[in-house]
Amino acid sequence: MARRPRGDGSVFFDAARGCWVGTIDLGRDPETGRRRRPKVSAPTKTECKDKLDELRAEKRKTGTVGRRDITVEHVVRDLLANPPAEWKSPSTFQVNTDLCERIIAGLGKTRLAKLAPGDVERFLYGMAREGMSARSIGGAKGLLVRAIRKAERDEKIGRNVAQLAETPQGTRKESSAMTLEQIRALFASGLTLWWRGYLMTGILCGLRPGELAGLTWDDVDFAAGVLRVRHSLKEIPVKDPAPGQSKTTLRLEALKTDRSRRTLQLPVRVADALRALRAAQAADRLRLGQHYGDMNLVFGSAAGQPRRRQDIARGFKRVCAKAGLGSDWHPHEQRHTFVSVLSDAGVDIELIADAAGHINSTITREVYRHQIADKVARAAVAMDQVFGTGRA
């Protein structure tokens, strides 16, 4: 009788257990150096051979046999313990951690060798039924794929089934733009000097929240009537923080692209609001002396310190609610409003892209499609008005 090829496995009866056992040799584990010999067992020799055939088929198809003792939770926890370098932002790390915990809650106990594309799809569609956003659902799938890929690389699993799963659409919260009536109501709502300067700069100049938080007085040239956008305020993790010390610090960082670094002409109302704010800050600086912050921020705290975006976002909601706009607003929607106002005024899309700091107008059309798309419909209406509808 022909012998099996080396490493193709063997079947024997285990008298102590009272069952047939099959085993296959996979060579040495790259992490432990020990030989890997996964086993199967069954009450009959035929059943045991069938199970061993499944292991051989998996080995031929993927080059290895996945470990039967590793669960989804194991690989996801490993990803969290060794996060990728691009997770340097605390907010990014927290979002991914929350998604990983959701994966663990839904699939954590499933053995990786038994995980099927259908299991992943049911989990993702469950997120969609809960009203989770398309971005969160896609993020969860991406994290699972990445976690399993590491196990796949280390020959702990034969294939990455998460890659085969379909991704549901989920919900998509579209950012809103304020109408002219809402903008006027906001500006007339008894704003403090700080909020008047912040809102007018955000809405009339279209800066991103990070750019507003990172704007310094050196960037504001009243004589030339321009605003130079050069920095963004970033939240950076602190390595080995001392007890009681914050895990993050705020730091000014230069904008990455030439198109992001832009110079804007100051609208008169913005210039007036910023002059008033600067005068108030000069009084604060004189009162606090050396205790006043040294970053020269336009939109810092009353003591000249940088303000965290979360704090500004909460204040923004309150200001909008006080003005009768409701509280479901985010500072980034000032930028959507900026694009919408310019678009309604007939400003060319290329000029809007320049003012917004986009690399090209395609980005502007995609990101702000809901603020610009109605122009297509209005173009058709205009043509009907010029040439008529042709109807009797």
Image (tube, rainbow, N blue to C red):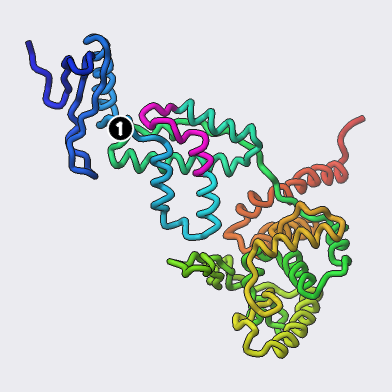
Secondary structure, magenta segment, majority class: helix
The residue shown at (54%, 47%) is 98
Q: Which residue is mark 1?
A: 67
Number of numbered tags placed on the structure image: 1
Where 62 sits versus 79, above or below? Answer: above
Residues in magenta, as a range: 100-116
Is there any visible trace of residue 5 in the rendered image? yes
Q: Amino acid at mark 1?
A: Arg
Q: Quadrant of residue 319?
A: bottom right
In this view, the residue farthest toward the right is 392
- In percent of width and height, residue 287 lies at 72, 89
The residue shown at (17%, 15%) is 15
The residue shown at (58%, 66%) is 260
Q: Quadrant of residue 45?
A: top left
- In percent of width and height, residue 9 lies at 17, 22
* Quarter that holds the N terminus: top left
Where 263 sits versus 333, above or below? Answer: below
Is there any visible trace of residue 348 in the rendered image? no
Where 36 sits versus 321, above or below? Answer: above
In this view, the residue farthest toward the left is 1
Q: Is residue 102 magenta?
A: yes
The residue shown at (40%, 51%) is 81
Q: Residues within 10 Å of mark 1 (few under 14, many from 20)?
A: some
Q: Quadrant of residue 225?
A: bottom right
In this view, the residue in front, 357 or 290, is 290
* Quarter that holds the C terminus: top right
In this view, the residue farthest toward the front is 16
Q: Is 118 on the left-hand or right-hand side of 287? A: left
In this view, the residue in front, 245 or 306, is 245
In this view, the residue in front, 377 or 317, is 317
